């Protein structure tokens, strides 16, 4: 899997290290462990790579994992 690196020019501005373009928050569709949901996430307008912030990984994605474990 190709891995993109994100860097911050300042605290509020994420940049795509591959394209050197500022990431834009867009409504993004996720399919995680068979569950689909949308979330506004930073995405590179050039290459399309999505940055999954800690709040999403620890929040929505953790909820999906918990739901699956409870089944």
Image (cartoon, helix red, strand yellow):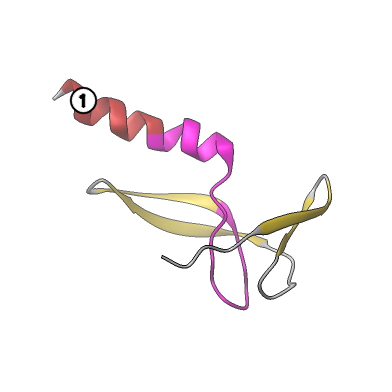
Residue 29 image offset from top left, x and y in percent:
40, 58
| 35 with respect to 51 (left or right) | left
In the image, residue 63 sits, relative to residue 56, either above or below, namely above
Q: Residue tagged by mark 1?
A: 69
Q: Residue furthest top?
A: 70
How many discs appear?
1
Q: Quadrant of residue 26?
A: bottom right
| 17 with respect to 57 (left or right) | right
Query: What residue is drawn where x is 26% and y is 45%?
Result: 33
Query: What residue is drawn where x is 68% and y is 63%?
Result: 23
Query: What residue is drawn where x is 62% and y is 68%?
Result: 44
Label 1 SS: helix
| 35 with respect to 11 (left or right) | left
Is residue 59 highlighted in magenta?
Answer: yes
Is residue 49 highlighted in magenta?
Answer: yes
Query: What residue is drawn where x is 38% and y is 54%?
Result: 30
Q: Residue furthest left?
A: 71
* Most foreground residue, 1 or 26: 1
Magenta span of residues = 41-61
In the picture, the quarter occupied by the N terminus is: bottom left
């Amino acid at each position: 899997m190709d891995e993109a690196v994100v860097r911050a020019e300042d605290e509020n501005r994420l940049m795509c290290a591959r394209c050197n373009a500022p990431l834009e928050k867009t409504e993004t569709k996720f399919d995680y462990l068979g569950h689909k949901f949308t979330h506004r996430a930073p995405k590179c307008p050039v290459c399309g790579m999505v940055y999954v912030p800690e709040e999403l990984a620890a929040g929505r994605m953790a909820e999906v994992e918990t739901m699956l474990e409870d089944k």
